[in-house]
Amino acid sequence: MNRLATLAIALAALATGACTTSGMNRLQPVDATRYHLGTPIPQGTVTIEPLSSTQEISVDYRRYADAVAAQLQSLGYTPVPDGSESDYVAGIAFRRADAGVLRERSPVTIGLGGGTSSGNVGLGGGASIGLGGKDRHIIISELSVHLRRRGDGTTVWEGRAQTRSLDEVPETQPSPDRLAGALFKGFPGESGITITVE
């Protein structure tokens, strides 16, 4: 392999580099999908309960429960205390899961340059690479809600909202209010269609 080809390959390898987090250092859009029976859902009283009987009643659960209750109240439903004989039960679940790793762009870079010539033809090039980049874990945050009639147990509406963030980067973390707001946007929404809320 001649010097010209070797230099071209080296420059290409440096330019492609690793994936960086530059596009994710901010709040990401929320994708929300809803399903329902296509019939009216009359307003009434509603209790908020864990979707699973194994769900821990933690501080995080309370934050999500309060966010869902606030959205339902804004839609004309009346949240009532746990254990009440309500018209509806809103079962909620939330999770955070690791979805991979991105390389954070390093603040320190070095430049490389080189050139070669053959006969009367000259070629020059350069590239810069980062030093000391840090791996950041991509986190998927998801909120699910099932709304069912207490009388017959029929699920009349359900939905899921999901977004991404970077672990240990506070400005990218979605709040329960953000996920719940996207989930109930335009309630009940078009069944089976995913919307994206910025």
Image (cartoon, rainbow, N blue to C red):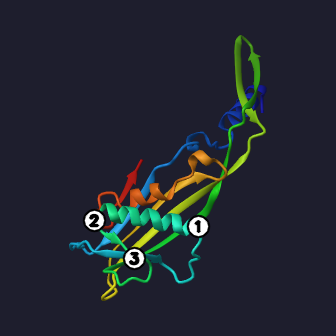
Amino acid of disc 3: Thr
Q: Residue furthest toward the top?
A: 120
Residue 168 horizontal side relative to residue 181, left or right: right
Q: Residue furthest toward the bottom?
A: 152
Determine contact: label 3, label 2, CB under 8 Å: no
Of label 1 and label 3, which has the lower sequence position?
Answer: 3
Secondary structure category for the residue under label 1: helix
Residue 77 horizontal side relative to residue 18, left or right: left
Residue at 30% in and 72% down: 36
Residue on which the image places disc 3 = 47
Of label 3 and label 2, which has the lower sequence position?
Answer: 3
Residue 28 horizontal side relative to residue 139, left or right: left
Residue on which the image places disc 1 = 59
Of 11 and 4, the residue lying toward us: 11
Residue at 57% in and 48% down: 172
Determine whether 143 is above or below 148 in the image: above
Secondary structure category for the residue under label 3: strand
Amino acid of disc 2: Gly
